[in-house]
Image (cartoon, rainbow, N blue to C red):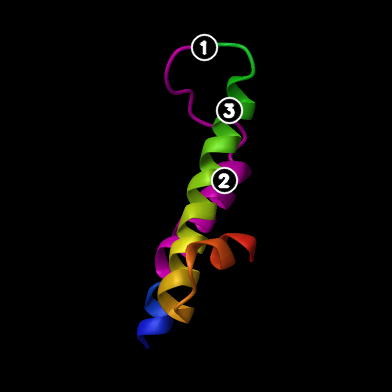
Amino acid sequence: MNRLRVWIPAIVWGAFISWLSAQPRPPRVGPEFPFKDKVGHWLLFCVLGWFVIWALRRAHNLGLPKAALL
């Protein structure tokens, strides 16, 4: 059960990204600047990647390089 529990943050964050993607007009946050949408996508998916690496390390007892490679 503990191996499944560590995946909850990644699943919830992925669902949040999917929910945001389904919005016809996503909320505008912060100041406007060029390529703001690209930076926002990059940040959201970096957090998702961090959650996945964290879950791989905890659930499968992997080192950081191996988890990041996966």
Give the residue drawn at x 55%, y 66%.
Answer: 67
Q: Amino acid at mark 1?
A: Glu
- SS state under label 1: loop
- Tell me if residue 18 is in the magenta stretch: yes
Q: Residue at x 58, y 51 (%)?
A: 18
Residue type at tag 2 = Phe
Q: Residue at x 64, y 28 (%)?
A: 38
Local SS, label 3: helix
Residue 4 magenta-highlighted = no
Whole-number angstrom distance, CA of label 1 to CA of label 2? 20 Å
Say which element carries label 2. helix
Residue 45 lies, in percent from the top left, at 57, 45
Report which residue position mark 2 lands on.
45
Is 4 positioned to the left or the right of 42 in the image? left
Near-viewer residue (44 or 68): 68
Pointer 1: what residue?
Answer: 32
Q: In the rendered image, which residue does mark 3 sit on?
A: 39
For the N terminus, the image quarter is: bottom left
Crowding at dot 1, Cα within 10 Å, few <14 / some 14-19 / many 20+, comes out as few
Q: Earlier in the sequence, mark 1 or mark 2?
A: 1
First reached walking from the N terminus: tag 2 or tag 3: 3
Q: Do the residues under discs 3 and 1 have CB atoms within 8 angstroms?
A: no
Question: Which numbered mark, 1 or 2, is in the foreground of this view?
Answer: 2
| Spot occupied by residue 26 in the image (x, y as percentages of width and height) | 54, 32
Earlier residue among tags 3 and 1: 1
Residue 56: x, y in percent? 50, 71
Answer yes or no: do the residues labelled 2 and 3 have beta carbons within 8 Å?
no
Q: Amino acid at mark 3?
A: Val
Which stretch is magenta?
A: 7-32
Within the image, what quadrant is residue 39 found in?
top right
| Residue placed most toward the observer, 62 or 2 | 62
Quarter of the image where one finds residue 36: top right
